[in-house]
Amino acid sequence: MPDQRPVPRNRLKTRTGCQRCKQRRIKCDETYPHCSQCTRRAFDCPGYKRPLKWSSKYEVASSRNATRGASSPNGTSLTAETAADAFQIPSPSSLPRVYAMANLDCHNSDGLQATSPDGSLPVETLAAMERQDNSSPKNQHNIDSISTLLDMEVLGQFNLEPESETGWLEWADLSLPLSIPQPLEDQGTGISRHYFVQVCRINSCFDSDTNFFRVELGNLMASSPLIYHCVLSMSAAHLAVLKSSIIPSARDYRTKALSYLQSDISSLRDANKRRGPVLDGAAEALLGSVLIGMTDAWHNPSFLGTTHLHGARVLFKRWLSNTQYDKGHLNTPSLTPSSSRLRSFMTGIMVYWEAMASFLINQPLDATAYLDAFCDQPSSTKLHPNPWTGICTPLFVYLARAGTLARQRLLFKQLSIMTSRGVAGNQLKADVLESARDTERALLSYQVPSQDMVEDAADPLTPLADLQAVARIYRLTGLLEVYRNFPELLDSSSKGSRGISEMEIHRLSSSEKIAAMAVSTLTLISGISQTSGVNCLLSIPLIVAGSTLQSTYDAPRRQASSNSSWDTLSAEIISISSHDSVQLHWRDFVRTRLDAVRGYVGLASVSRAREILDKVWARSDIQSAVGVSSTGAPQQFVQWTEVMVEEKLETVLG
């Protein structure tokens, strides 16, 4: 490299090399300013600074002979054991788990959290560090720094004999509070550590050894520069919320990730000339596209990442079509499309991205038709829980259709204002309505998987009951989005089922039925703990159900007599959800729960979700106040997608 030069002879080598080479246990050439090993692998070289070691040469305790014989103010002497107990740091095992996690999250550090009474690291702490080193190559501590801290033995540097009590007190007075330095690490290592400590937890509806984002993605970071920079880009963007100084680094990692993605896609064009890494390259490019596109809003809420979506569609189709190659040709067999677990993961993240993007872009009704093949789950195989879709991947396909239909309805409304409706316009409306009816049938026929059909996620914070609850929530969410945009579907269904009797006890309006569905959805959400991992999936259901809490004016219902008391009560019970006091209660619940989701995931896009809902409710209240004295025509819902577009609040809400 032209900007590198060998170490001159008159400069002393460190004998250990840079921290990254020492961590990977490979020989470092100590080229200045960056070693060749790190440069060749596109890593940030941490340099050759020597670790700081403790020195007892000039300690205050050396003057203990001059003050020997001093005692404590109350006349009792301070023993060595008492002093050691006074400055003992509690171990993580003695703290509650929630407090330990909160302390780790807030300080964003995994430095020394516990010491034994003599100041050295306990065996349990070292064992935990060793397990962490073995589990994640990119989340390792600096081995040299740990050995340095072991050599310190802070309390052991002083001769805590009874005659040296005053020396100990003098040292304690000058050095309070006792602090132990953290292991030295470069910025890239710290950002990588933040990914495994925080991002893996909030980027998945469950977190365990079966979490693809933690295990497989961590392994890919060691071999793929694209995945490595994608992970650091999203981790730095998440960390920048707490540390604004990380923003330039987050942008740099994103730029490098885009560069590697472009390079990998270019290399795929020559795939016909190669056999070995074809599938590996397609899978890595697809995974990189999803990570970059879905986390664009982490850098800026206005970034939608839709450009990468179109490329990811092509890569996904190509990756699925490469099943004719043998596994023996691959460098990483786990990246083959025939791997059921990876196939489920890739399909889930693509379906989830399509569902989130469907509310942001105008696209044809068949744009997501390539995912229809994944709606049917064979009963002979168990479901692999997906970090982004849980156990209900087909529901996100239907939600993507509902979002596309909502955008089509909005586009049709805008075109109707500018042009007169003709034959073409009526045909377009009929096609959209028929597609909405097909989506309604698919949602109504969906069944939540039973316990024996799902593999264990191995996460105590996310039990299977929570994943099943999310499936029920998203089923109602999809139906809500369809019925709120096409309420005539409810009216046509009720008319078709009235052939048994001509009597209508309490004819419910479509708005009352939709409001009851919204309250039912929010009731299911209220049953999920705020510590559950599925909280990262609740933004869209809260928006869809929350935006339905609107006061709509309807003409008085005609009542008739009936011999069935339940027919009378059922209509009254359902209509309670439309009462103003009930809707105000659930609006407060939605605000509170969105704030909880915002605190859980730590992303600014959730704040936009609440802003969208506030504007929807404000418009609805004004419309309701004006509509009371109107001619009695039924009042239409204020659509949240329309408000989002008009107020320029588009963002990735997942």
Image (spheres, grey):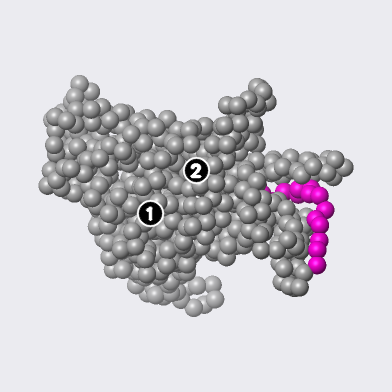
Residue 265 percent coordinates (x, y): 28, 30
Determine the main secondary structure of the stretch shown in magenta.
Answer: loop
Work out how far the residue at label 2 is from the one at label 1, CA to CA, in angstroms: 16 Å
In the rendered structure, find residue 376 and report the number of the disc placed on it.
1
Q: Amino acid at mark 1?
A: Asp
Q: Residue at x 39, y 73 (%)?
A: 80
Q: Residue at x 19, y 31 (%)?
A: 271
Splitting the image into 4 quarters, where does residue 567 fall?
A: bottom right
Q: Which residue, as the protein is rendered here, is positioned at the far bottom? A: 76
Q: Which mark is residue 401?
A: 2
On residue 504, which mark appears?
none
- Tell me the magenta residue range: 547-561
Residue 548 counted in the magenta span? yes
Q: Residue at x 40, y 46 (%)?
A: 372
Q: What is the secondary structure assignment of the residue under circle 2?
A: helix
Q: Looking at the picture, tell me which residue is in the foreground, 429 or 263.
A: 429
Amino acid type, residue under disc 2 in the picture: Arg
Q: Earlier in the sequence, mark 2 or mark 1?
A: 1
Magenta segment includes 553: yes
Q: How many marks overall?
A: 2
**Closest to the observer, 17 or 457:** 457
Vertical comparison of 389 with 323: above or below: below
Note whether residue 602 is visible: no
Secondary element at tag 1:
loop
Q: Give how far across and how far down residue 192 sits, in percent.
A: 35, 46
From where the camera sits, is residue 128 visible?
yes
